Amino acid sequence: MALIKRFLAYYRPHRFLLTLDMLAALFISLIGMLYPLVTNRMLNDLIPNRNYRAILVAGLLVLALYVVRMLLRYFVQYYGHIIGVRMQASMRSDLFSHLQKLPFSFYDEHETGKIMSRMTGDLQDVSELAHHGPENLLISGIMIVLSFAYLWSIHIALTLIVFACVPFLIVISALFRKKMRTAFTERRKGNAQINASLESSITGIRVTKAFTGEEMEKSKFEQGNEQFVTASKDSYRAMGKFFSTTAFVTDIFNVIILIAGGFFLYRGDISFGDYSTFIVSINLFISPINTLVNFTEQFQNGITGFRRFAEVMDAEPERDREGALTLENVEGNVCFSDVSFSYDGEKDVLHHVSFSVNKGEKIALVGSSGGGKTTVCHLLPAFYPLEEGSIAIDGRDIRDITLSSLRRHIGIVQQDVFLFGGTIYENILYGKPTATREEVIEAAKKANLDGYISTLPNGYDTEIGERGVKLSGGQKQRVSIARVFLKNPAILILDEATSALDNTTEMLIQRSLDELCRGRTTFVVAHRLSTVKNADRIAVIDKGEVAEMGTHEELLAKDGIYAELYKLQFRQDLTPSDALQSMLV
């Protein structure tokens, strides 16, 4: 019931149009009652009395009203769907806004394709339910009541006999509805699995071709496809049982009328004209019942879609702590104090990590993969909530700071650069949407990107393709650096920013990064120790703990983990001639 109330709440902004739509549906029902009334009058009065003029007038009147009903049906079809589409747009807008507020952990657990399935296919079914639901219920309800009253006026006993079959139809509907709901939910999951597989395969098509993995991708897709077919079989099996059985019950109505009506006609309890009218009018009673029965499929589709929509809407969003303040005039002093964290609530990734970084200082985080370096960078902008310990910026706990203001003062350059579809200008502007074009160009110059952009036919308005596919790795990285230059944060995180680049490109990008780091508190995550030698301090993160801390020279002198890593990389980075020369020395 709570789910239905949430669904009905989306009708509120469209109450006026919905009222007109329902009034139109009401008049459609009333006009539908006209035909059996005229039929009864003709069979019992006009035809026996040979009143041909009245017959013609009655026919023209019915024709005129049918023209009106045609116009009303157009109104209901058009504006009814408009209501459904507007409700769908409102739900989609709410869902998108809510998705923007969900934490990283939600996206760790939900595939993009499955989320998109809820945003598109599910809400399309909800839209259809929003349009047809009220109309079917109102029109069918009114028609059942009016037709029952009219049949009652013709012959009470015959009407009661017909009406006695209705409870059987209700019981059958109740028995099959639960099975249909379960089956349709599973079909939704199968469809979402297909979308997830399709999204993943299309996004990674270049990797697929590079590794000739077409057959593997096809196999994975077919697994989801087969799951959808199996779920569809179950849903259609439940639906087939439901509709065939309910249709059989409604067919029995006609058999009962034929036998019982014939019996009453034989006994003289009903006239031939009334009996003929009853046979014609019974469809007024059976048709809306069939409409409600057929509506069950649409209702199950729509309510299942809305339930899946509600599941995402009920996911807990990121929230500012009560009384959280806006972070302003940031100097950039950062302090990690006894921080422990785990992604799954079981195995800790960080164990009691404590260290401080002074404003304008550059600290490098090094260590083996999986040691917790990137987790440190994720916790600083509060991408994941702290479990133990605290992180402070300028002496203020980040949990007491609004998330938007916290992240506004932190810039991130990652190894995997994400660029949005659009132009170079739009992607740089993302760093500060209110910036002028001159500011965007200045940021591009600082990132050593302006020279390249000037060689393009459309300059800054050049389309870069999906995820920046038309740009090289170095060019994409420079766009991300320009974006951060434009943002101008007090704290900077460089998470493997150059690890995916070749040595020549890395040297060029490093100049831009050095300029970007100047005057900012900077966290550098890197595997290549040669890129962090000049950091003010280096923290070795090993198995979730700060194992060592100091300058490059200090850590080499300790001859510990850092020294071992440096020696290992130094040997690997040497060319054969360099290695020979080092041995001779």
Image: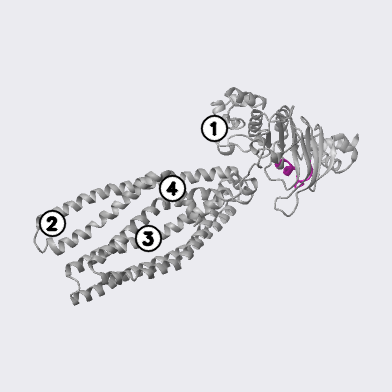
Residue under pointer 1: 463
Query: What's the residue at 54%, 28% (across, down)?
Result: 461
Q: Amino acid at mark 2?
A: Ile
Q: Nearer the viewer, residue 484 or 316?
A: 316
**Furthest-top residue in view?**
438
Residue that label 2 marks: 55
3 or 4: mark nearer the eye: 4
Rendering coords of residue 205 (x, y %): 58, 46
Of the image marks 2 and 3, the number of the one nearer the N terminus? 2
**Between 580 and 285, which is closer to the camera in this rendering?**
285
Measured along the vertical axis of the image, is residue 179 above or below residue 405?
Answer: below
Report helix, strand or loop for mark 1: loop
Residue bearing the label numbered 3: 292
Residue 109 marker: none
Q: Is there a contact, CB below 8 Å, between mark 1 and mark 4?
A: no
Is the residue marked by circle 4 packed among few (<14), some (14-19), or many (20+) residues within 10 Å?
some
Q: Residue at x 51, y 48 (%)?
A: 119
The Cα–Cα distance between marks 2 and 3, rounded to whole angstroms, is 34 Å
Q: Amino acid at mark 1?
A: Glu
Location of residue 271 in the rendering, given as x and y in whole percent from the top left corner: 17, 70
Q: Which residue is mark 4?
A: 11
